[in-house]
Image: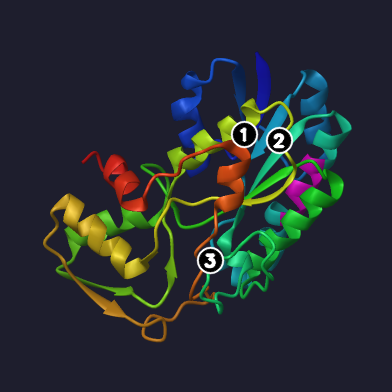
Amino acid sequence: MKNILVTGANGQLGNALQAIAGQYPEFQLLYTDKDTLDITSEEAVEAFFSRQPVHAVINCAAYTAVDKAEEDEEAAFLLNFQAPLILAEAAAKHNSAFIHISTDYVFDGRHYRPYTETSETSPQSIYGASKLRGEAAVLGYHPNAVVIRTSWLYSRYGVNFVLRMQQLMQEKESLNVVYDQVGTPTYAPDLAAVILTILQHPEPAGGIYHYSNEGVASWYDFAIAIKALTGASCRISPVTSEQYPTPAQRPAYSVLNKEKIKAAFGITIPYWKDSLAVCLGK
């Protein structure tokens, strides 16, 4: 068995990895979170690597409170930049593979063609800027690392758009949802399966890869699909971003081009509505 360190194990992606780990008997996943491993401490990370062999690291930990990050920049950069740097340095030192999760928010959303891995980055928020710095840190210290940018992550766990919409649709008669921000929802178990598939490859090529489910949607489209699948009676109205201001600016368009990851690892990516139906048990 190969030991795989999973950080942020109590988050959406960490929970998804735990749910499917039994399908990959060649891996022993070592689940950690902030209470069991301080990834902002070089000493704590080095001690973990020294206690047992670590074949690979999956860094799911992140500061993901996008709006809160605008006033909590230090905390966002600590977890999204400093921690990945420390993990990547330790992984490189111990010859461990490294998979790091990043975000579509590294783009400004002003281009209306799916973003490739080589598209120009220009984050418009503290969250996006901190994640972009994290990417550079990981690849700077561990050039063979795999950085996966994903978008609009959701699951049955934690805090996410699907669970929040389900709750609000039960509580309210009407909701306003923005229609001028376009991207692709990503079901966390789909991403988890891709990560473990990548680790099955003996020497995956390092660098940046994009992964989301297939298709394109606005947040309004996403909400309408949730309503249809759950049978909610709540009225949903489309509004502009200007009508629903937030502290952090979101990309207006952040659809990701996934040709590179499909070609490199021979994966087939589910359509976003099909994965949403799976999530909701429909």
Whole-percent x, y for residue 102 in the image: 62, 53
Where in the figure is residue 62, as x and y percent of width and height? 61, 51
Q: What secondary structure is found at the residue carrying circle 2? A: loop
Residue under the point 51% across and 32% down: 17
Question: x, y (%) of residue 226?
Answer: 25, 56
Mark 3–mark 1 distance (CA, rounded to whole Å): 23 Å
Please give left or right for residue 73 compared with residue 20 in the image: right
Q: Please tell me how crowded label 1 is: few (under 14), some (14-19), or many (20+) other residues with Cα within 10 Å.
A: many
Specify the amino acid type for callout 3: Pro
> In front here: 232 or 1?
1
Is residue 151 depicted above or below 26 in this figure?
below
- Quarter residue 171 falls in: bottom left
Residue for badge 2: 204
Residue type at numbered disc 1? Ile
Relative to 181, is 28 above or below?
Answer: above
- Residue 37, image x, y percentages: 69, 34
The residue lying toward the viewer, choosing from 167 and 94, is 94
Quarter holding the C terminus is top left
Tell me if label 2 and label 1 are in contact, CB under 8 Å: yes
Q: Measuring 43% from the left and 59% from the top, which residue is drawn there?
A: 184
Q: Which residue is mark 1?
A: 198
Q: Earlier in the sequence, mark 3 or mark 1?
A: 3
Image quarter hosting the N terminus: top right
Q: Which residues are magenta?
A: 81-88
State which tag comes first along the sequence, 3 or 2.
Answer: 3
SS at mark 1 in the image: helix
- The outermost residue toward the bottom is 242
